[in-house]
């Protein structure tokens, strides 16, 4: 087991701290010692429920406040430290990229900010002529039938040759692989994935 932690020094040190907290608490419960930890010493201490009895429910003792501090949002199947870090990183990067372009920014930062603006600012993309390239591709190949495209009337379906032409142009396989998965958000449903 310790081989896994050997390659992850931060995780190993935090697991050792959790073990030390538990051992000191256990000794303290017998009256031999007390422990005064702050969030600066152990940032994850606010996830713990120190009022819970670890002998009865160790999970509640070690992680009892995590769900209260970080409730699941709609559409979220799970939340853990990694997803919290990912959210914080995405927020930081978005803040950096959405900041105005300054003259003293490095060339790579200017290019990244310009690309981010091009993707997120509708008025910017319309002024330089990027008008819905995906709509142009759909119209080129007959449109959506439900929106009045050409696949209606006498020949409602595209031929295999047309499908092969589309696949060749975009480099996709014309053979699909269906897969069935359990929905992580709703156990009573399954999801069909076609690749």
Image (tube, rainbow, N blue to C red):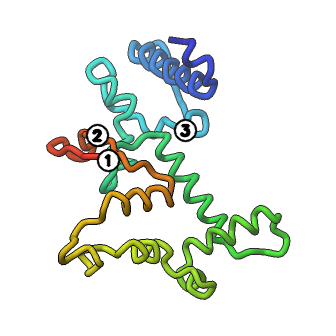
Of all residues, the one furthest to the right in this rendering is 104
The image shows a total of numbered marks equal to 3
Residue 137: percent from left, percent from top: 45, 72
The residue beneath circle 2 is 179
**Location of residue 170 with respect to 193 vertically, above or below:** below
Circle 2 SS class: strand
Cα separation, mark 3 vs mark 2, equals 42 Å
* Image position of 152 (left or right of 21): left
24 to 44, vertically: above or below: above
State the mark number for residue 194: 1
Residue 81 location in percent, x, y? 48, 40
Give whichever of discs 1 and 2 has the lower sequence position: 2
Marks 3 and 1, Cα distance to the nearest angstrom? 43 Å
**Contact, mark 1 vs mark 2 (Cβ under 8 Å):** yes
For label 3, the residue is 43
In percent of width and height, residue 169 lies at 50, 60
Q: Residue most toward the left?
A: 188
Q: Residue at x 66, y 64 (%)?
A: 96
Residue 144 vs 41, above or below: the answer is below
């Amino acid at each position: 087991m310790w081989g896994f932690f050997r390659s992850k020094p931060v995780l190993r040190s935090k697991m050792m701290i959790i073990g030390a907290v538990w051992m000191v608490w256990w000794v303290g419960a017998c009256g031999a010692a007390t422990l005064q930890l702050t969030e600066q010493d152990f940032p994850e201490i606010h996830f713990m429920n120190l009022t819970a009895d670890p002998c009865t429910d160790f999970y509640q003792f070690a992680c009892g406040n995590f769900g209260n501090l970080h409730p699941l949002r709609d559409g979220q199947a799970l939340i853990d430290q990694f997803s919290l870090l990912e959210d914080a990183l995405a927020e930081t990067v978005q803040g950096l990229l959405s900041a105005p372009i300054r003259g003293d920014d490095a060339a790579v930062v200017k290019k990244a900010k310009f690309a981010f603006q091009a993707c997120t600012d509708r008025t910017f993309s319309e002024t330089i002529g990027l008008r819905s390239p995906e709509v142009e591709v759909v119209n080129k190949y007959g449109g959506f039938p439900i929106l009045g495209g050409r696949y209606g009337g006498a020949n409602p379906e595209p031929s295999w040759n047309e499908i092969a032409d589309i696949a060749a142009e975009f480099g996709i396989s014309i053979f699909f692989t269906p897969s069935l998965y359990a929905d992580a958000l709703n156990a009573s449903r399954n999801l069909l994935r076609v690749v």
